[in-house]
Image (cartoon, helix red, strand yellow):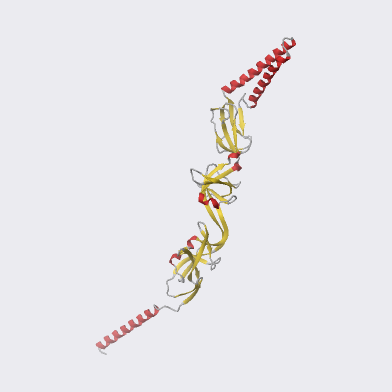
Amino acid sequence: MTQRIRVKVAIGIAITVAIVSLSLYWWRRQPGPPTVVSGGAGQVIVEDSSPVAKVKTVPLSYGRINETLTAYGIVELLPSTIEIYNVTFECIITRVLVTAGQVVNPGELLLIIKPSPDTQLIFKQAQDELESVRLEEALLSDRIKLQLSTKQDMVPVQLRSRLAEKKLNSLKERGVESMKEIRADSAGIVYFIGAQPGQTVPAGTNLLQLANEDQIIVRLGVESDDFNRLEKGQSVKLKPILAPDSKSIEGTIQTITRRVDPITRLVSVMVKPMSEGKLLLNDYIEGKIIVSSRNALLAPREAILPDSGGHSLFTVMGGHAVRHLVQIGLETSGKMEIISKELKEGDPVVVLGNYELSDGMPVVEERKQ
């Protein structure tokens, strides 16, 4: 075989190999037989050569969902339950043995006071007056025995004597004659202290306020637009704003005022916390008022997609994505109520990779823990 023939044969073989390779590549690029996937809206025909998406799914759950209204407020005491300690005479504060916010027991010493110089003078005058009247009464009694006066003359003297005695006894009962200890009549929280050691205070001064610990209440401020959604007895979850990781305290709405505060422009709602709940007076509180609650089919919020003015989600069936149009009911920060006749508890709903999906698209599913 000559050199020229060998070259022609080699070229022919190379051309044949190239043609066969191109044919195989073209054949592999052709779509395979269609696969039918049953979906919620009917049957969707897809091709095996479609792109494959990686997704994560979680099963739909059925449970209780609450619609809440968030409001903020402060811990207060019911004004009608505050016990006020004062004195009816001018005095000097000798010692203050408690601090505001302190819990005290029945009989515990709160304050020590003593009469002021002016009060002591009034007490001395009352003593002198009674002594003078009694002396006058004794002298008049001797005059009557000597028939120098009549019993009728004794009447006004005896009246002045009784009045002077009552005045002195009244001062003694109020503790005017000496230092006086003021003790707690019942257990409670020291809510207010209105006097300092060494201070001279007039009669009737509010020295101290003691409140029953069970009468703590939370005043929440609610927008007037939400007023009609509130009812007495609704459950509220209370949590201190400055301690967001603390456990919520259960409470119920006790009073709903029918007045908009002129400063905050909010409606005041009084919430009674559970007796075992421990809240600090004047602490700022976040309250979540449960305005609606029911059992429903629940999906994670990240599974829901906007869809032509409505909502949709994807489930996985037979290795393919299936689109479902759904209605949304109650919502929380993490879950949403799903209303759909096609879906049921346990269906795998896509929560990651769903924005890239189309109906019938092949997927590789990974269950999210």
Between residues 38 and 226, which one lies in front from this camera angle? 226
Give left or right: position of 74 versus 135. left
Q: Position of residue 55 (x, y in %)?
A: 46, 66
Q: Is residue 331 above or below residue 120?
A: below
Q: Is residue 349 above or below residue 228?
A: below
Q: Is residue 369 visible?
A: no
* Residue situated furthest front in the rendering: 152
Between residues 209 and 279, which one lies in front from this camera angle? 209
Q: Quadrant of the N terminus?
A: bottom left
Q: Is residue 224 visible?
A: yes
How many discs appear? Answer: 0
* Residue situated furthest bottom in the rendering: 1
Q: Position of residue 140 (x, y in %)?
A: 70, 13
Q: Which residue is painted at 51% across and 65% down in the image? A: 326
Q: Which residue is painted at 47% across and 76% down in the image? A: 35
Q: Position of residue 28 (x, y in %)?
A: 40, 78
Residue 122, image quadrant: top right
Q: Position of residue 327 (x, y in %)?
A: 51, 63
Q: Is residue 243 above or below residue 90?
A: below
Residue 189, image quadrant: top right
Q: Is residue 337 above or below residue 158?
A: below
